[in-house]
Image (tube, rainbow, N blue to C red):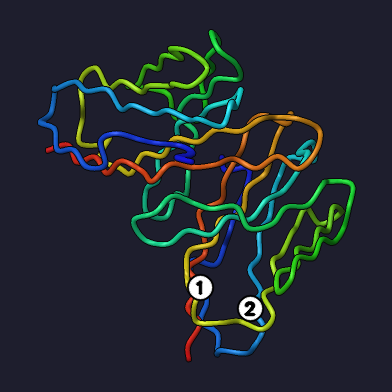
Amino acid sequence: NAGVTQTPKFQVLKTGQSMTLQCAQDMNHNSMYWYRQDPGMGLRLIYYSASEGTTDKGEVPNGYNVSRLNKREFSLRLESAAPSQTSVYFCASTYPGTGDTEAFFGQGTRLTVV
Amino acid sequence: DQQVKQNSPSLSVQEGRISILNCDYTNSMFDYFLWYKKYPAEGPTFLISISSIKDKNEDGRFTVFLNKSAKHLSLHIVPSQPGDSAVYFCAALFNFNKFYFGSGTKLNVKP
């Protein structure tokens, strides 16, 4: 029972390079999210997808793009990485409803842009 | 502007005593409030939640209190254990679909 799986776990990029962070969940969840965690800032929402085929901007979407490839997978792309994007990135998923709704998180991707 | 705020970056408590972590929010339309626990190099894990229509929820050593008039919630851990040492994030759920997180409080429980 894998839950939410993120790849890679670590990455170092040079300024201007591009990369895609991958996320997959096996819990049949409808909603998926990308967050970044920075010291003193907590977890900030980059993009989310309420269902397959839909995506919406969160609090800090600039410099990122996302793709909800299918129900299981939600990728985050940095087209031209900048040092300000150095962060720990977390993917999460949930099955929204009217009851208790918790989000399940992946292990995180630590990205350094030099 | 942050909609969910945790104003204490850190808290140190003796083992066996009570830990109280606090959280304030600005949006009265949040549906649920949740607490997450995070260890280094791991993703956050769900701890406990409370519906916006309730004022208390208890699960073992963990109790969450919600004061809607003050837009304030708190997490009580009794008794605190060294294994509780972690970063605790408060989160609020909007429209049953969008989570907003606070900046976290690092709890250190001393043996």
Is residue B54 or residue B22 the one in the foreground?
A: B54
Q: In percent of the image, x 31 and y 20: which residue is there? A: A77
Q: In percent of the image, x 57 and y 46: which residue is there? A: B101
Q: On the rendered structure, is B4 left or right of B33? A: left
Mark 2 residue element: strand
Residue B107 bears which disc, if any? 1
- Whether label 1 touches label 2, CB < 8 Å: yes
Q: Which amino acid does label 2 sit on?
A: Ser
Residue A79 pos. (x, y %): 24, 17
Is residue A19 or residue B7 the one in the foreground?
A: A19
Q: Which residue lies furthest to the top in this view?
A: A53
Q: On the rendered structure, is B111 left or right of B47? A: left
Q: On the rendered structure, is A12 left or right of A37? A: left
Residue B17 pos. (x, y %): 64, 88
Residue B19 bears which disc, if any? 2
Residue B16 bears which disc, if any? none
